[in-house]
Image: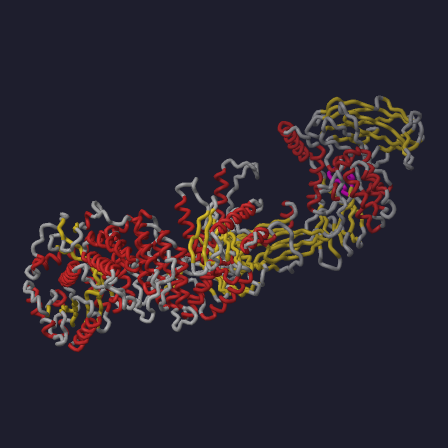
């Protein structure tokens, strides 16, 4: 369902990145990286009204093959999901659902007392769950 | 954003699509008149650069129209224009090429002809749209043709002539005069006959001031043509207009009913739109706006999407012209940049500016623009004014309008619809027309336009350009998200274009993203462009461009060229960074820049080491090795062609330094202060209290300061611990120290590091100067890369940034040799590290030897001017002085030692030892007189029959002292005759032990080791002046073998009162026969391990000495009492010591091992004398004078008297001491000695004494004599003896010391030897402590033989 799910830290350093296609991982990383500009811009805009702040940023941009969606938590952790453009069946609500689930997974992972914020997320459980999320069977 | 429906497919057979995108276009170009500015002829772009710039500067003119309004008309100069773009001129009039200026340079007529041909051919090419053209020709310098003075030419005004119909200007008469002097170019050269254009001729070096005026004139002409076209168009009747078509539409309308209402509207709408375009170009913005609005409505009603789009775009353009005039200025920059593209530098288009913030952008852009505009317009205005004044007659239209420049006037123009309100530049903000599109709506209009365009496949170019224009406007509006949207949209536009165009598109997108500060996006597209350049299948991969672009995308990935900066930031996406650098490396390699490839690879290893897996690390390292095989890397900056500096990269962590220790010099070379400043440490050596924390912080801060010194010209060492993180062996060659400060000669080192193993490496070097040396790190050469690894760049290891070592002036160094063999074992004394050589020697106790020590000065230049010798050893200072002696004077006399020469001196060694068995003092004291007597007796007697009595000893000795019991018991277990000697409580000869007799009794008569160090402090040269020296030492290992031992001793009175006999048991502990010389003329031979007893006559200790001793002791006691109240030394101890030294001083026993020349002297130092012995060794204070029957009694004299006869006994006592004697009791006792050990004192029936036999003398003053007389009557015959003794009776005395002559048989023999006439004073009391009892006896006892009458 999703090509790639990335968790990006406050300082825009990658915390976690999972792709469905290992060979294209680097390419996807480039895309995700490029998407960060828009995420930052959107965060900047949202700064004015914190109460109305929407965590879901919507589609950041799209290319021939991908649609890239963004989500930012209140602690400025960014989630980026790359989705196949050709998959028209996927509705935005489903993308939102992916982000919601991802947010929960992330929160669970970060609750691990052995995790230091800002470090890479290397938990197997988290990884498994994200892979599942990516393949679309939550 | 794209139109939802499918594309409106128009005829695809003809492709009137614009072949090339104009990426530079922005919204304001809609209002510009297009002029082709072209250099012609052989390229001399550099020379003509200034001419181009001058022309370019004239990009707008102000025109006053017939209604008196001043219009500003803008021009756009382009370098190239595809002819087919003109076809779109109906669709958007600004795409039509209206003017042509060629600039050329010629040297001769032929070239001029060529230039003219070029110009004409261009004219023909764009003939359909061209209004007018000009040619600017630069001719050869005057000197090359006629004039010989080039200076004159330099000053000369440009000679300007025009050829043509309308302007034989005569106002430049002055200039013409000048020109005539030099000859006019056009006189020399003539244009060919088919050249119909107007041309300006200039000398090469003179670009005339009037060039701008000429150009403005030309532009003016263009404007008026345009204006006439506009008027023409505006006058067209609505029902007569023909349909305007976009190029690809031509076939769409074939056969359609053009007269239908719909199509009529379409025609009208399109014409209106066209008119709007023209109005916009002609500077009538308000007209244009309203026309666009009208056209938009008209066309929308007929569903003409393409033209609706064009109207919308036109609206945006017109609004943008009003809202954002400053965009023009940025545009001129772009033009210039694009012109200079002829330059070959690959990195020209580096990202020049960041969007720092909205504010700066808004502020900066106008500032810059106003600056340039004012300059340009002022320039222009001058030219224009002068020109217009000069040629006022030419254009009649222009004449009447000098007054109304500023005021907005309204007048109905010839067009039917609108009123024109001219808004001058300066006032636009005040009154914008009401139908202008609001800034926030511009985006929407653009969006709509793009959607409309997107319905037509052939309008892709238009669409793309519209998107670019839109994004540029959005940049101006500071709406980055919209920019991103438009730019993103460009990628969707399906436009068949060449690869190079695609790349160009990416680059433009990159540039725009950079302008809004989307560095990541920019980098993304930059990288895409870079990849496109070298895409597979490309015929001509352009690696140079690819490399340039990749380098440009560094910032987007938070990479910097400087590795240190990257390490500092440690940000970005490592995976992407690694990938990017790798692509860069391959690009560099393809380019053949091996140096760059190596550099980038080094950079990659240095910066991304931590982000790579072990496998990647080793792979990269191998790659680096391969790269560097082509070109070695060295730590110098590389400069690219375009001036970009690539800073050096260093393999700082390859190998990985884990530890760095600056080593002190070896101890014997270490410099020291000659005079050590006294450390004022006070009584407390350590305190945990730190009174000020500042102190501690200082210490920490100065971590880099090394607290020892290095010496000039001396090899010094730094020790590194390195780890090789790679899985293969790493050869590191040419490792050197990196230093600052004083000149330092670093010695290269090469190591091969095993994988993952810590390796110690020592780097050496030699400071050449004195001063501060700053150790900064080291340099390596590994994997083909030379690196400078500085400590400050090593992260995660808490190294100080540098180490500072002080270097002092050079010191000489010496080597030392001894004449003795070196010892096998090393000493374990203090500062053993000073030892440079050793010597060993074996001596018998008491033996003397000597050793020659040779000192060689090894330094080449420095003399040894200062030399100090001292000796340290593990023996007492006193003993040491006896053992080692040096003639220091002689040694110092040999100084200085010149370089490379030697001196010698002699060290005398004497094997000093104690030869006397110790008798523990406490033992004797506690046992009292009886014990002591017994001891003396038994020890002697026991020794005489050595074999039998060993068992008796432990009993005696061990009982009082538990401390000693252990020792003794150990020995007592050892049975057998050969150990008997050792079981005796002998005086151990260990020098150090003699003062602690008790615990060392056990130390056997084995060899004794003495370790000594002969320490030298030496210096010379400048260092001596500064107070430094070096220290080294010779270690001496002496083995002292036992020679003789005095196992026991006693004191006997001698025949002369001034002497006594010291009786010694001397045993030979060597394995050889020993000859002993104990007095001047007496020798005795002792077999190995045997002993013998010798008497030695010794002078008694004089009373004066005793008195001195006593006085000293009293004083000392007093002092002690006052100060410490500690135990007072007993007087007898002092006395005993005194006597002991007395004996030791006088008695020297020389021994000689027979058969060899080994000889020595045994001293009696440390001999212990019991109280009674002391009495004998000193001269007694009481002098006896006894006479029997008026005859003075001599020792061993026979006294005879008869039974019943009274015999008179007179006893005289004289106090010879310096002190009075108190409480003396004189006792006379007769007894019979049966000579079998029984003495019978019960003689009441045999002898009677008249008068008391106990007399008390209360006090006997100094030199006072006391006499006692009595009579004795013997009743029976026989041999009687009389003991006469005098005792002091202390008040509280409890113990009485008695000392009777030992009466053991063996002793009596000795007694016989001693002829003792004068020892009537056997009992000597010297000194008289009132608290101690003394008994002086008259020895030997008086013997009286009683005979029958």
**Could you tell me residue B348's position as x and y percent?**
33, 62
The count of marks equals: 0
| Among the 4 quarters of the image, the one containing residue B117 | bottom left
Q: Can you say whether B98 is above or below B1194 in the image?
A: below
Q: Can you say whether B1185 is above or below A23 in the image?
A: above
Q: Is residue B341 left or right of residue B405?
A: right
**Could you tell me residue B280's position as x and y percent?**
21, 56
Q: Is residue B168 left or right of residue B140?
A: left
**Could you tell me residue B1103's position as x and y percent?**
69, 34
Name the residue at 32% across, 52% down: B444
Q: Is residue B929 left or right of residue B1273?
A: left
Q: Quadrant of the C terminus of chain B?
A: top right
SS assignment for the magenta stretch, majority: strand
Asked if residue B1188 lies in the magenta stretch, the reply is no
Asked if residue B1051 lies in the magenta stretch, the reply is yes
Q: Nearer the viewer, residue B937 or B334?
A: B334
**Could you tell me residue B787's position as x and y percent?**
46, 61
Q: How is the image coloured?
A: secondary structure
Q: Nearer the viewer, residue B58 or B426?
A: B426
Q: Which residues are magenta?
A: B1050-1062
Q: Is residue B832 visible?
A: yes
Q: Is residue B804 visible?
A: no
Name the residue at 75% across, 32% down: B1324
Q: Nearer the viewer, residue B1163 or B8?
A: B8
Q: Is residue A88 left or right of residue B185?
A: right
């Amino acid at each position: 369902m999703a090509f790639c799910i990335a968790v990006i830290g406050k300082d825009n350093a990658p915390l976690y990145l999972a792709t469905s296609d290992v060979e294209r991982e680097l390419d996807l990383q480039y895309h995700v990286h490029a998407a960060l500009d828009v995420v930052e811009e959107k965060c900047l805009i949202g700064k004015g009204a914190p109460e109305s702040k929407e965590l879901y940023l919507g589609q950041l941009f799209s290319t021939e093959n991908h649609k890239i969606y963004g989500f930012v938590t209140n602690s400025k952790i960014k989630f980026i999901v790359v989705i196949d453009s050709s998959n028209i069946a996927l509705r935005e609500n489903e993308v939102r659902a992916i982000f919601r689930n991802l947010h929960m997974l992330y929160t669970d992972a970060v609750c691990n007392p052995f995790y230091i914020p800002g470090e890479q997320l290397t938990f197997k459980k988290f990884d498994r769950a994200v892979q599942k999320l990516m393949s679309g069977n939550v | 954003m794209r139109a939802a429906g499918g594309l409106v497919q128009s005829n695809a057979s003809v492709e009137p699509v614009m072949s090339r995108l104009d990426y530079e276009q922005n919204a304001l170009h809609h209002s510009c008149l297009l002029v082709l500015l072209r250099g012609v002829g052989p390229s001399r772009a550099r020379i003509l650069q200034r001419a181009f710039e001058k022309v370019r500067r004239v990009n707008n003119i102000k025109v006053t129209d017939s209604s008196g309004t001043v219009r500003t008309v803008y021009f756009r100069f382009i370098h190239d224009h595809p002819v087919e773009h003109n076809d779109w001129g109906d669709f958007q009039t600004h795409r039509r090429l209206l003017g042509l200026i060629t600039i050329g340079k010629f040297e001769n007529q032929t070239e001029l002809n060529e230039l003219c041909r070029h110009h004409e051919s261009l004219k023909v090419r764009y003939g359909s749209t061209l209004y007018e053209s000009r040619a600017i020709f630069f001719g050869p310098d005057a000197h090359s043709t006629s004039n010989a003075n080039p200076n004159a030419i330099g000053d000369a005004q440009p000679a300007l002539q025009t050829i043509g119909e309308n302007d034989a200007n005569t106002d430049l008469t002055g200039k013409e005069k000048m020109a005539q002097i030099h000859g006019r170019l056009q006189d020399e050269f003539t244009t060919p006959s088919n050249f119909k254009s107007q041309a300006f001729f200039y000398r090469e070096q003179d670009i005339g001031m009037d060039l701008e005026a000429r150009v403005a004139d030309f532009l003016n002409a263009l404007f008026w043509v345009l204006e006439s076209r506009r008027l023409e168009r505006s006058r067209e009747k609505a029902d007569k207009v023909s349909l305007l078509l976009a190029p690809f539409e031509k076939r769409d309308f074939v056969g359609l009913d053009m007269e239908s209402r719909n199509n009529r509207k379409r025609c009208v709408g399109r014409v209106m739109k066209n008119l709007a375009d023209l109005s916009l170009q002609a500077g009538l913005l308000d007209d244009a706006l309203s026309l666009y609005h009208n056209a938009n409505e008209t066309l929308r009603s007929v569903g003409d999407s393409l033209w609706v789009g064009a109207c919308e775009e036109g609206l945006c353009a017109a609004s943008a012209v009003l809202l954002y005039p400053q965009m023009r200025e940025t545009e001129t920059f772009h033009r210039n940049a694009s012109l200079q593209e002829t330059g070959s530098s690959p990195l020209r288009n580096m990202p020049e500016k960041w969007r720092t913030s909205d504010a700066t952008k808004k502020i900066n852009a106008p500032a810059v623009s106003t600056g340039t505009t004012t300059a340009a317009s002022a320039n222009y205005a001058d030219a224009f004014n002068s020109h217009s004044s000069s040629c006022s007659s030419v254009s009649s239209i222009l004449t009447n309008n000098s007054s109304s420049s500023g005021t907005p006037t309204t007048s109905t123009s010839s067009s039917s619809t609108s009123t024109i309100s001219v808004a001058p530049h300066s006032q636009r903000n005040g009154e914008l027309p009401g139908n202008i599109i609001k800034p926030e709506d511009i985006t929407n209009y653009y969006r709509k336009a793009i959607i409309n365009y997107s319905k037509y496949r052939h309008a892709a170019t238009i669409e793309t350009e519209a998107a670019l224009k839109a994004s540029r406007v959005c940049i101006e509006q500071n709406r980055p998200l919209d920019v991103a949207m438009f730019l993103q949209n460009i990628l969707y536009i399906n436009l068949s274009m060449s690869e190079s165009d695609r790349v160009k598109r990416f680059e433009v997108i990159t540039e725009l993203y950079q302008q809004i500060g989307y560095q990541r996006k920019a980098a993304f597209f930059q990288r895409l462009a870079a990849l496109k350049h070298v895409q597979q299948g490309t015929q001509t991969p352009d690696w140079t461009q690819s490399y340039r672009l990749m380098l440009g995308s560094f910032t987007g990935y938070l990479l910097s060229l400087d590795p240190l900066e990257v390490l500092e930031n440690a940000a970005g996406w490592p995976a992407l960074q690694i990938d990017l650098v790798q692509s860069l490396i391959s690009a560099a390699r393809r380019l053949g820049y091996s140096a760059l490839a190596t550099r980038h690879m080094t950079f990659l290893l240095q910066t991304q080491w931590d982000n790579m897996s072990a496998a990647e690390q080793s792979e990269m390292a191998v790659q680096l090795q391969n790269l560097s095989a082509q070109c070695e890397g060295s730590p110098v900056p590389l400069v690219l062609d375009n001036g970009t500096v690539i800073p050096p990269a260093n393999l700082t962590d390859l190998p990985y330094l884990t530890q760095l220790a600056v080593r002190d010099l070896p101890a014997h070379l270490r410099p020291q202060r000659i005079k050590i400043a006294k450390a004022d440490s006070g009584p407390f050596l350590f305190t945990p209290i730190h009174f000020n924390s500042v102190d501690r912080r200082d210490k920490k801060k100065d971590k880099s300061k090394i607290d020892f010194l290095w010496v000039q010209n001396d090899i010094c060492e730094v020790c590194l611990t390195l780890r090789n993180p790679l899985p293969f062996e790493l050869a590191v060659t040419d490792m050197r120290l990196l230093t600052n400060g004083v000149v330092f000669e670093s010695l290269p080192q090469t190591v091969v590091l095993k994988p993952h193993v810590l390796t110690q490496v020592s780097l050496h070097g030699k400071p050449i100067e004195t001063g501060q040396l700053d150790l900064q790190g080291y340099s390596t050469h590994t994997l083909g890369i030379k690196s400078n690894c500085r400590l400050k760049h090593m992260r995660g290891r808490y190294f100080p940034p540098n180490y500072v070592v002080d270097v002092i002036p050079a010191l000489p160094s010496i080597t030392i040799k001894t004449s003795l063999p070196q010892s096998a074992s090393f000493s374990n004394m203090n500062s053993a590290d000073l030892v440079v050589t050793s010597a060993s020697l074996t001596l018998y106790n008491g033996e003397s030897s000597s050793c020659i020590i040779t000192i060689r000065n090894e330094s080449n230049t420095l003399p040894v001017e200062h030399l100090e010798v001292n000796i340290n050893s593990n023996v007492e200072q006193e003993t040491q002085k006896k053992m080692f002696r040096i003639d220091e004077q002689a040694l110092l006399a040999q100084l200085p030692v010149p370089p490379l020469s030697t001196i010698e001196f002699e060290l005398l060694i004497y094997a000093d030892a104690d030869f006397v068995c110790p008798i523990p003092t406490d033992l004797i004291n506690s046992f009292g007189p009886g014990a002591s007597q017994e001891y003396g007796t038994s020890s002697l007697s026991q020794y005489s029959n050595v074999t039998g009595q060993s068992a008796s000893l432990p009993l005696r000795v061990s009982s009082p002292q538990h401390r000693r019991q252990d020792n003794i018991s150990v020995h007592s277990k050892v049975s057998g005759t050969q150990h008997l000697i050792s079981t005796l409580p002998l005086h151990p000869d260990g020098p150090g032990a003699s003062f602690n007799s008790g615990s060392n009794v056990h130390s056997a008569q084995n060899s004794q080791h003495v370790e000594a160090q002969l320490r030298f402090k030496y210096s010379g040269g400048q260092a001596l002046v500064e107070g430094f020296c070096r220290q080294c030492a010779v270690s001496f290992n002496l083995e002292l073998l036992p020679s003789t031992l005095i196992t026991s001793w006693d004191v006997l009175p001698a025949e002369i009162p001034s002497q006594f006999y010291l009786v010694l048991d001397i045993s030979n502990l060597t394995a050889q026969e020993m000859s002993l010389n104990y007095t001047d003329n007496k020798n005795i031979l002792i077999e190995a391990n045997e002993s013998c007893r010798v008497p030695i006559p010794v002078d008694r200790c004089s009373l004066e000495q005793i008195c001195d001793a006593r006085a000293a002791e009293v004083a000392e006691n007093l002092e002690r009492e006052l100060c410490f109240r500690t135990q007072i030394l007993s007087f007898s101890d002092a006395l005993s010591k005194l006597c002991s030294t007395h004996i030791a001083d006088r008695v020297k026993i020389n021994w000689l091992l027979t058969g060899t020349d080994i000889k020595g002297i045994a001293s009696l130092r440390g001999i212990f004398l019991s109280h009674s012995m002391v009495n004998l060794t000193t001269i007694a204070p009481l002098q006896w004078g006894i006479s029997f029957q008026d005859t003075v009694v001599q020792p061993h004299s026979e006294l005879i008297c008869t039974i019943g006869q009274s015999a008179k006994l007179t006893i005289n006592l004289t106090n010879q001491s310096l002190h009075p004697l108190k409480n003396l009791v004189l006792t006379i006792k007769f007894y019979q000695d049966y000579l079998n050990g029984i003495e019978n004192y019960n003689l009441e029936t045999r002898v009677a004494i008249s008068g008391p036999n106990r007399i008390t003398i209360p006090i006997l003053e100094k030199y006072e004599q006391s006499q006692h007389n009595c009579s004795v009557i013997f009743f029976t015959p026989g041999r009687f003896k009389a003991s006469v003794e005098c005792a002091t009776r202390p008040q509280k005395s409890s113990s009485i010391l008695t000392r009777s002559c030992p009466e053991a048989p063996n002793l009596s023999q000795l007694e016989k030897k001693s002829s003792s006439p004068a020892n009537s004073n056997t009992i000597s009391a010297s000194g008289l402590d009132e608290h101690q009892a003394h008994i002086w006896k008259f020895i030997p006892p008086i013997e009286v033989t009683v005979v029958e009458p």
